[in-house]
Amino acid sequence: MGLFSKKGPSGFSSTSTAEEVTQGIDATGLTVIVTGASSGIGMETMRVLVLRGSHVVMAVRNKDAGTNVKEALLKEIPDAKIDVMELDLSSLASVRKFAEDYIALGLPLNILINNAGVMASPFKLSQDNIELQFATNHLGHFLLTDLLLDTMKSTSRESNIEGRIVNLSSLGHQYSYREGIRFDAINDESKYSKYYAYGQSKLANILHAKELNRRLKEEGVEITANAVHPGAILTNLMRYDNFLHSVMKVLRPFITKSIPQGAATTCFVALNPQVKGVSGEYFVDCNVAKPSSQAKDADLATKLWDFSLTLTNVK
């Protein structure tokens, strides 16, 4: 990544790590949920947030795997505050149970990091009969955010600390279907492309943050919502595509980031004081970047919001 490591206005670049972009930041007293925190950049994000003093709730599909990660991290950081809770984002029932259980704990919530995802999977429907990538990457996080938003609002009001929501998107959002979101063919197997479907879900992540930002501003709530592109990283996200994984291995020295570098933009947007008050933006390499024209389409964002409400049966 050396060829592409020019620092941006934030003072950071593609080679910056999550520890570097949060150096000197005290996150003591902050409570954070990180989805998909048991592996890859989610795990590194969680580790660095804990290192800075925050209480992190790992929202993971495999609770045993999450517990193993927690126990290993406690050896490195003995006073770490970590909880592990089960969450399968492809199941709306699981999302509802997670939110219900979390609220029952009476914990505050300062930061929500919608990190988990799947990439380029073969066509499959979720338990709720929704195409898997759209269901997991967007819809599960949409519902999770909606169900936890009141907790975030009350936390922000009571603590007088800005809440932050971070959606993990991707440069892949530029390569969605021609119409952006296929509202009328979301489950059409005959027209399915695993790459376009991934791009569609990542476009949805940005549109979700944009529309959420608009609504939060209308309410006058001190919570920001942003989307980030972590970069090209070799993780188990690529488990469905052996060819792409092989290509990435060959090109690793030139185009890929390490996991600590991949978690940097998420941690920057979640904790860095430079981002205070910044909302509705798309970040790449810890700097505000321009997404695709579809990702800036306010009408598309509103339509996606209404579509998501319908699919999740949210009033």
Image (spheres, rainbow, N blue to C red):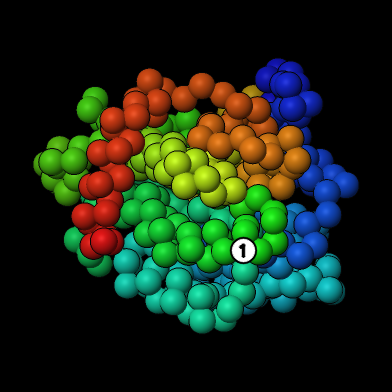
Q: Is residue 250 above or below residue 150?
A: above
Q: Estimate how packed mark 1 is, as few (under 14), some (14 to 19) or many (20 or more) residues with alpha carbons within 10 Å.
A: many
| Identity of the residue drawn at 27% across and 54% down | 309
Residue underneath mark 1: 155
Instruction: Give, as a three-letter code, the residue at label 1.
Output: Thr
Q: Is residue 171 above or below residue 215?
A: above
Residue 246 in sight in this render: no
Quadrant of the rendering where the N terminus is positioned: top right
Q: Quadrant of residue 176?
A: top left
Where is residue 42? Give x, y as percent.
60, 55
Q: Is residue 144 above or below residue 2?
A: below
| Identity of the residue drawn at 28% across and 61% down | 314
Where is residue 114? Give x, y as percent.
51, 53
Q: Quadrant of residue 51?
A: bottom right
Q: Is residue 207 left or right of residue 12?
A: left
Where is residue 260? Give x, y as percent.
71, 45
Residue 251 in sight in this render: yes
Q: Is residue 1 left or right of residue 245?
A: right
Q: Quadrant of residue 299?
A: top left
SS category of the residue bearing label 1: helix
Depth order, front residue of 312/138: 312
Q: Is residue 192 left or right of residue 163?
A: left
